[in-house]
Amino acid sequence: MQPLLAITGILTRASEAKEKTEEAQEKEGLELAVTSSQMEDVNTLEIDKEKLENAIKQQFGNNKDFSVTDNEDGSFLVNMNDTKRIYYVDELGKVISEENMLKISTADELKAFRDTVNSGNKYEGWYVYLTSDITLDINEEWEPIGYCVQNSEDTSIKDSIYSENNKPFSGIFNGQGHTVDYVNISNSKNGQGLFGLVANGQIKNINLGENCSINMEGIGCGGIVGIVLNTGTIYNCNNYTDIEQTRGGVVGAVIGSVTISNCCNYGDLNNASGGIVGSSNGTDWEEFADVYHTIINCANYGNVSRDSNIVGGIAGYFKGTISNCFNNGEINTTVSVVGGIVGSLTGNILNCFNTKMVSGNNVVGGIAGDLERYIHNLIKNCYNIGKATGQGKDIGELFGRNTNNMSEIINSYTSSDTFSAEDLGSSFKEDTNNINNGYPILQWQ
């Protein structure tokens, strides 16, 4: 006869194995339900809450006790109340179970998470989320989440970005609308911000509070994220603090195929490249020759200044498409290549507007400073009502320089024109509440 302790151990292992099997079956059932909800509309993979709920009922039966929370960013939390398990469903339908979810509620937990990332845990395939606002110690220098090695005199920025010693964050981080405040950054290192280096990851729904002390001089420095590498999504991230020196109010540099959406900068930026994004880096690297970025539904309200060339209200230098964005902060510089939306553009500006003064030296435009030479660029359905001024040449209400007339300006207006929301297209609506002095505003405002 086996000892009682041995029998108890066998029964415990059997119970654990049964529980793991049941959890695997539950996750597999949820994955099938998600796929079923996506198949209802062959034209899109977007998931609808009602369709997802119906698909779960069909998969598990009407007696299944569950609830679905819409995160309002294309993702959902599914709480299986009867088994007490929680699942995260991302915007593409990937299901992450609770064992790969990390809840952060305190400053100590945020720092512990940071230290784990910077020790080499990328959190790939994980969902990390805040459940409360986080207040840091303003007297303690913040080390970013995600580490980028510092390039020396004999190391190129490319080698620095791709160094095997880098420690990026590659999971999904959801601030759930919470604020991290009293962040202290004061150095000249590369890849600085709340997050330093994000590679193939997502940062969403997080705010940087107004009581931070930030002065970052390195390459790829931004209020929320320093560098976004390869593929990445930055969604609904907002900066509320004035920053003494940075590249971007929200993101410092994008390298690869990156989408920045629904982000706002409210802080004044001294010596910065862009209100939302500093620049597209690596655009001359062979692997990114045909790679373009996207900025959509973003706004800058802060004043932006800089003591070196290429400055924009939304982005400094950008390769890709900027759409449905506006600048409502003064761009006040004495340098060249300055624009209300973008300083230097390789790509398109669609459905955007600028309301404030844009000043510089040469190549200054109310929408774009420099439309990159020998490249076909497009400005469409845009307007500028801010004054564009400069001390040198190539100053324009819409653009500064369009070398060889390689670029197109379509259906775009200045303050001297008469135009309406209808003239600008379906992305605009009339300013019925006078939030923009009667000029058309974007549908999302």
Image: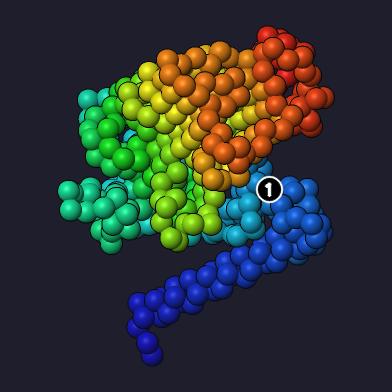
Evaluate whether residue 402 shows in this view.
yes
Residue 188, picture quadrant: top left
Q: In the image, what residue type sits under mark 1?
A: Ser
Give the number of marks: 1
Residue count near mark 1 (Cα–Cα under 10 Å), binned few <14, some 14–19, many ≥20: few
Give the left or right position of residue 9, taking residue 115 as reference. Answer: right
Residue at point 61%, 44% (across, down): 376
Above or below for 388 versus 180:
above
Residue at point 31%, 40% (across, down): 219
The N terminus lies in quadrant: bottom left
Give the left or right position of residue 322, taking residue 140 as reference. Answer: right
Coordinates of residue 66 in the picture (x, y in percent): 69, 52
Q: Which residue lies furthest to the bottom in this view?
A: 1
| Residue marked by disc 1 | 67
Coordinates of residue 231 in the picture (x, y in percent): 49, 54
Coordinates of residue 205 in the picture (x, y in percent): 53, 37
Residue placed most toward the observer, 116 or 77: 116
Give the left or right position of residue 91, taking residue 107 as reference. Answer: right
Evaluate whether residue 276 shows in this view.
no
Above or below for 286 versus 344:
below
Residue placed most toward the observer, 400 or 89: 400
